[in-house]
Amino acid sequence: MEAAGLIVGSVRSEDLVTLKEIAARTRRSYESVRPWFALHAPASPVDQDPLTLEHDRLIAAADHLVRARALMRGDHLADGLTALVSA
């Protein structure tokens, strides 16, 4: 995308949403969504599908890196951030 002259600001997967977003989409309160997940969602990441966990982890890591780079764009410390990420 950057080769085409676009600035990348984040990486997202539509499969990743917050409890707040779920509450808004289902027109329920945040608290009602939270107890539902406490009862129905896996208790720990160990209970989840390993491929799903890996996908979610990679998307989240990529998003953090891209956002950090966007925040640092034009900053004299950006080279240090790039070196840190590349290490």
Image: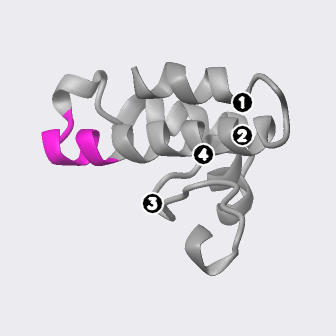
Q: Residues within 10 Å of mark 3 (few under 14, many from 20)?
A: few
Of the numbered discs 2 and 4, the one sitting upstream in the chain is: 2
The residue where tag 4 is placed is 66
For badge 1, the amino acid type reads Ala
Instruction: Please name which of the two marks, 3 or 2, marks the residue nearer to the observer.
Output: 3
Which amino acid type is shown beneath numbered disc 4?
A: Val
- Judge depth for marks 1 and 2 and give the one in front: 1
Label 1 or label 4, whichever comes before in sequence order: 4
Q: CA distance from mark 1 to mark 3?
A: 30 Å
Q: State yes or no: residue 51 in magenta.
A: yes
Magenta residue span: 48-55
Residue kind at label 3, given as amino acid type: Asp
Label number found at residue 78: 1
Where, quadrant-wise, is the N terminus in this rendering?
Answer: bottom right
Q: Which mark is residue 30?
A: 2
Sequence-wise first label, 4 or 3 = 3
Which amino acid lies under the numbered mark 2 shown in the image of this protein? Tyr
- Front label number (1 vs 3): 1
Element assignment for label 3: loop
